[in-house]
Image (cartoon, rainbow, N blue to C red):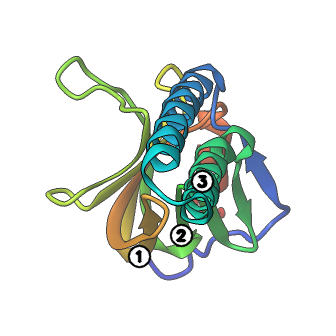
Amino acid sequence: MPAGRSRSSGPSRTFGLGTRGPWLGLVAGVAALGAVEVLVLHLVAAALLPRPVALAVDVVAGALTAALLAAFVSPLRSRHRVVDGVARLRLGWVAAVDVVLDDVASATVHRPTAAAPLELGAAFDEDTGRVSLVRATTAPAVLVELSRPVAARVQVLRKVRTTSVLVGVAEPDELLRALAPAPR
């Protein structure tokens, strides 16, 4: 960024991720699959293992399924924030990127195409270095290009370095204003 164009650290701003419907459908599917998996595992363990071991299998399977569901539910209450000169872009516990506003090279509304549609969820594209955080494919998206790679977390625990972030956001124009450099 040219000298003299510092970023504002004005008041905290929050931005919604768009409608919850598509993500809620994904959560419902994962919950149903998890319930069936735990039930089948319980029936097999009860039939083949001693009672204490079968109980341990039930507890472990139930705890792991509950933890997975908690991670999947977290984007339903997630919001992006711009505060103290940092854009905190989140998809619940699933993914996160903290971008210092001075590292934003450009931010534009992203227009998906039939060849490159918006994809639901959190992803990292190794070829482009782009992190994608999308809760609803029907919501507008903003593409944030960075002047240098920044650390990001995707798929709950995977650490990557990203050069751009594609975020689904309900208020794209307001996010673009929050990411813009302060006037001289």
Distance, label 3 to label 1, CA atoms, is 41 Å
Q: Could you tell me how far apart the alpha carbons at marks 2 and 3 are, in whole angstroms?
A: 41 Å
Q: State if disc 1 and disc 3 touch (CB < 8 Å).
A: no
Q: Quadrant of residue 53?
A: bottom right
The answer to whether one can see residue 138 in this image is yes
Of 38 and 14, nearer the camera is 38
Give coordinates of residue 90: x percent, y percent.
60, 55
Question: What amino acid type should be assigned to the residue bearing mark 1?
Answer: Val
Q: Determine which residue is flagged by label 2.
A: 99
Mark 3: give few (<14), some (14-19) or many (20+) Cα within 10 Å.
some
Check disc 1: other Cα within 10 Å, few if <14, some if 14-19, many if 20+. Answer: some
Residue 150: assigned label: 1
Figure check: 149 above or below 176: below
Cβ atoms at labels 1 and 2 below 8 Å apart? yes
Decide: is 43 above or below 89: above
Residue 63's x, y, as percent?
Answer: 64, 58
Please provide percent x and percent y for residue 51. 60, 58
